[in-house]
Image (cartoon, rainbow, N blue to C red):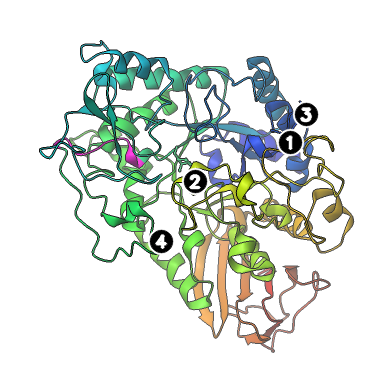
Amino acid sequence: MSAPVERADAFRREPRWWRDAVVYQIYPRSYRDASGDGVGDLAGIASRLDHLVETGVDTLWVSPFYPSPMADFGYDVADYTGVDPLFGTMADFDALLEATHARGLKLILDFVPNHSSDRHPWFVESAASRTSGKRDWYLWRDAGADGGPPTNWQSQAGGSAWEWHEVTGQYYLHTFLAAQPDLNWRNPAVREAMLGEMRFWFDKGVDGFRLDVVYHCIKDAEFRDDPPNPDHDPKTDPPFASVLPTFSTDRPEIMPLVVEPMRALADACGNRLLIGEIYLPLERLVDYYGDTGEARARVADGERPSAARAGVQLPFNFSLVFADWTADALAALVRRYESLLPPDAWPNWVLGNHDQSRVVSRIGPERARLAAMLLLTLRGTPTIYQGDEIGMRDVEIPPDRVRDPWELNMPGLGEGRDPERTPMRWTDEPGAGFCPADVEPWLPLGDGGELPDVAGQLRARDSMLELHRRLLALRRAHPALALGDYTCIETCGEVLLFAREHGGERCTVALNLGEEPAEAVLPEPGGETGPTVLVSTRPGRDGERLSSSMPLALDALEGVVLDR
Ligand code: GLC
């Protein structure tokens, strides 16, 4: 058996396959439009699987494609077990699942537990009358003492989180848009129904879920007001930041009522992965691992009387999205995250997604190459957002093309997410290989001479895509990079240095975050002869043998991976 086949085989059967997985997020509206209506679809994804295999990723997370009025572009689900005609049919989904598995890829879906669409039959029934059998499936409350909303809770999409419902004379809660009413997870019937929706996809064979804003699912049982945020500046900060979300989110019952039952289901269905979308400080984030394998093993041995909790395998770690790109700040971040992880918990790192300004636009194209090297060499499962592998930038959206309700509700505060959601650029032709040339895509493709595209980057040497391919191939070839522990994390001036080791093999990574050339003394030089450069972010250095007696010389903003 050849090495790739062996790996694919092990990947398929290994219970903790997600530890050496590389996740790639597909935002289906913008990946590829096979039907020619200007919006991406499932058949479009299926037609571009080779790109993913050739790039070297192995686990696809597909953002929602379920029937939806599209108030939040699919994150407002009207039927958890269907396919919106805009994206295709269930047969298209089945074909996609089969095609991904045939290529040795895993497929994980997006599950939106906190809220449904206001057009979901459950909400329609709930809103029909106060005595509806499904009234308690959502969060309905009488007006507050002043006749206004029952609490001061704020919607993430702007304004109060409560919407007045004239017909039944009560408010309902929506942590996001009014078109996204929050489900009541304290109600056992809701829990049973939602787990049933997850099971539908598990039974089809999907390999896991990314759980949309899962930390929001439980709110304070007593509906207490959130405390005001003393640092809020209404001129620059979004309105939802005017309160600290103490009572409206991340409540203690979230684990027993939501996360643990989901994990129990995922485990019962056999080695399925749960990734939690959780924007919380690291100290809180790590709680969502629950008790990890070690703790559960102790229970199995009868050491602990209480039942063990199991959370999600990967609570998304978004720290790099908000990080300062200096060596000291990054070293401190990695050390702090590692020190907070519960025993046996597996780390993960994210650089971007469909809700965040693109990494190239945040930190510039050169630092984005360093960021790619960092993402793919840190300990933990990396997630790549579609288009970041070719260095796509935020696209400027003319006012008449703005689609994101967040921008429309909170104009000018930088909350709009259209710029990072523009269609994937496959070629430099009109339509960018995304949609037919004579069709207007749902968001602009961008213009201007320097826009990257897949075909162009495959022809060019030293492109962002080639860097991703080399780094991902390296990760596959060196278990030290995929699975190794850190033997050191340190800085030398502006250079971040870390080394990873697995099964007697070591790799060192050195990233010069400074704008000047730098020299770094390697932490663990070892051996008579110097190490070899496996990959550099700069052209022409791969394979260079370094001197054992000289410090490592790095160009401005250059990163290297060394073979020991
Ligand atoms: C998540 C999604 C985002 C969506 C929100 C509400 O943060 O990533 O796109 O608007 O949840 O579902």
Q: Residue at x 64, y 56 (%)?
A: 394
Check disc 2 and give the amino acid type: Leu
Q: CA distance from mark 1 to mark 3?
A: 9 Å
As drawn, the label of residue 408 is 2
Q: Nearer the viewer, mark 1 or mark 3?
A: 3
Precedes in sequence: disc 4 or disc 2? 4
Residue visible at 75% across and 60% down in the picture: 464
Secondary structure of residue under mark 1: loop
Viewer-nearest of labels 3 and 2? 2
Which image quarter holds the N terminus? top right
Label 3 element class: loop
| Nearer the observer, 391 or 182 | 182
Q: Is residue 215 above or below residue 119?
A: below
Instruction: Check disc 1 and report the residue beneath it.
Output: 32
Q: Which residues are magenta?
A: 215-222
Main SS category, magenta section: loop
Mark 1 vs mark 4, CA separation in Å: 36 Å
| Residue 464 seen in the current view | yes
Please provide percent x and percent y for residue 95: 70, 20
Q: Which is more N-terminal, label 4 or label 3?
A: 3
